[in-house]
Image (cartoon, rainbow, N blue to C red):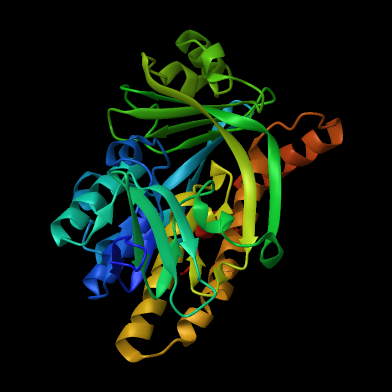
Amino acid sequence: MAPNGIPRASTRVAIVGAGPAGLLLGQLLTVAGIDNVIIEQRSPAYVLGRIRAGILECGTVEALARAGVAARLHEEGLVHHGIELSFDGARHRIDFHALIGRDVTVYGQTEVTRDLMAARAASGMPSVYEAAGVSLHDFDGARPQVRYRKDGAWHVLDCDVIAGCDGFHGVSRASVPGAARRIFEREYPFGWLGVLSETPPVADELVYASHPQGFALCSMRSKTRSRYYVQVPSTEQAANWSDARFWDTLRSRLDPATAQALVTGPSIEKSIAPLRSFVCEPMRFGRLFLAGDAAHIVPPTGAKGLNLAASDVVTLADALIARYAHGDAHELDLYSERCLRRVWKAERFSWWMTSLLHSFPGADDFARRIQRAELDYLVSSKAACRSLAENYVGLPH
């Protein structure tokens, strides 16, 4: 017990946040024999209920395999060898496998989280869910603390390192004094209205559609469950959209062949996601290391959010393993620099994809002609297609 009567425990690494970033980090450390505790403010059901991305880069698949949680992914995931771009009434395929010999895998973030939760439970490593009042202390010193309230009682967790994996709105980044961090941000004047439906996908691979009325995306979670998006103003509300209105809008933005093949049905989830580019520099503050959405946000156009989080935690896990297995802290010193180099390249690619495919309010005829020329150049240039392919499947960790 602490002097003031508060129960006290200790671990090497305190992980704040039990989303896929925190869970993957915990699993990688557990496999390496490094003690860690995960602290999450929400319930397991809430964490699993989040509907998020479903495109995994090669490096993310490799990280999950290294963590020992890829069996179901390999069995159920859909390997995609490319994507299709739809504009001016036609579809154009970008063949990743032919261009660079690599692919992506469709496997929902919810399923990734479910697999990681199961592995965590099997490992016996501690996780504290529904922790209230989480706060971080003394991470600028030698012995940080995480304090939280559980079942009405306060607890203190002493640790060597805090990994802030609790997302954009979490406590980790907010615990850093504003003068110590630099923020780079851009908000876009539109969002994505997404619908999940128990309908077969309209195509074998994702279809990204650019249309004068707005962007659309035909994606999937499985061979029987589809995920579709349409661009809407940032002020729009999902409640204003009936299923019929959504399907009519989606169909109007697709090329005729894709629109005719579209199978519609009742939505089982409908929500609007705002689009934002955001980076916090640095990603290390003393013994606090930010990872995933706590440090950066990308527009979903480039399918980079979950994959960037995985890249961060692999880098952090390797640095912590070097510290505890070999007594080498140099890798921890390089963590922020290494992550940010990759983060900014993903930010660039996500910004470029967003600019390429969306209709921007107030765009003049010149801007629209430039966008059209960019699309035409992309699908007619092997070099341009190769650049898209190597960024989409993921740059090396």
Q: Relative to residue 118, is residue 96 drawn left or right?
A: right
Name the residue rendered at 32%, 58% in the picture.
38
Instruction: Report the front residue among 302 and 192.
Output: 192
Q: Exactly how many numbered labels are in the figure?
A: 0
**For residue 365, which quarter of the picture?**
top right
Q: State the image coordinates of residue 293 (x, y, percent, origin top left).
A: 51, 52
Question: Where residue 7 sits: x, y (%)?
Answer: 29, 61
Q: Residue 253, relative to residue 343: is it above or below?
A: above
Q: Is residue 381 visible?
A: no
Task: Mark yes or no: residue 41 visible.
Answer: yes
Q: Is residue 165 left or right of residue 86?
A: left
The location of residue 288, given as percent across then percent down, is 50, 69
State which quadrant residue 21 falls in.
bottom left
The residue drawn where x is 46% and y is 12% is 243
Front residue of 180/109: it is 180
Query: Is 219 placed above or below 258 here?
Result: below
